Image (tube, rainbow, N blue to C red):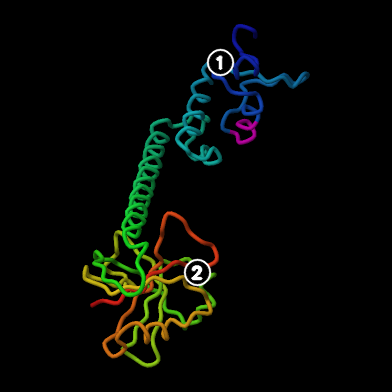
Amino acid sequence: MAKEYLTIRRFAQLLGVNINSLRYYEKLKILVPAWIDPQTKYRYYLPEQLITLDTILLCIQLGIPLKTLREYMDENGNLNEKVILEKGKEMMLSQISELQQGIELTEFQINSIEENQKYSDQNGIYSRRIKERYLIETPFNGDFGALHEKEMAGIVIRRETAPAAYSFFVQVLHPDCQDSRIIHIPETEFLCRQLDITPEMDLLEILRKDFDADQLKLAIVANMPLAKTSFNSWHSEIQVPV
């Protein structure tokens, strides 16, 4: 037996895994010992089972859940390595796509902070040209006390009708043109004013005082991310298209 089988300790050492991991793989029935001594309960493995162990380690590296590996086994308990590699490639491509989106979003946030810093010392009304944006809206009833409960980029206020209509919005970089919630804000000049929004603030009253109420049909109250933020209020910018 010494020439044919490997002890569990030796088997684990050959690929640098611990014995507890082998016991876990046995529990999952993805790597079962070739022989268990009925008296001592010692576990033994065949050298060729190192291929299965190597495939399991590859699955861990690829992020394939071990509990799903039995789906890739034939009736003899052999793992289909080609199918596993194809699945691993699919998962890695998905992870790469998510990372690329994360990098793009991070770059967008950095650019927004840098652009906002150009206007960080502005007081009163000022003019600012803002690039085109695509926003996803979620209507709400104008209860600004709910601000703390929302993850949002800002608020859209429409005054074409009475009473005014409100919606939360988030900005999207790659809009789905079929999504009816998306609105397009073209690049144009905006009259702007900065303020720290609190739930008690009357935004309509501020709009009436600081902007031409007769001409004002749409106002965007956008969160204005800066290098430093406050948790007690939202530093925002009122944006009214010229």
Between circles 1 and 2, the one closer to the viewer is 2
Label whose residue precedes the other's in the sequence (1 or 2): 1
Give the magenta range.
24-29
Please name whichever residue, 160 or 13, is drawn nearer the observer in this view of the structure: 160
Residue at (56, 32) in percent of width and height: 30
> Residue 14 got which mark?
1
Q: Amino acid type of disc 2?
A: Lys
Question: Label 2 crowding class (10 Å Cα cut-off): few <14, some 14-19, many 20+?
Answer: few
Q: Amino acid type of disc 1?
A: Leu
Q: Is mark 1 on a helix, strand or loop?
A: helix
Q: Quadrant of the N terminus?
A: top right
Whole-percent x, y for residue 107 in the image: 34, 50
Q: Quadrant of the C terminus?
A: bottom left
Q: Does the magenta segment cover residue 172?
A: no
Q: Distance between the residues labelled 1 and 2?
A: 53 Å
The secondary structure making up most of the magenta span is helix
Q: In this view, does 233 lie to the left or right of 26?
A: left
Query: In which quadrant of the rendered view does residue 47 lie?
Result: top right
Q: Does the magenta segment cover residue 26?
A: yes
Q: Mark 2 points at which residue?
A: 150
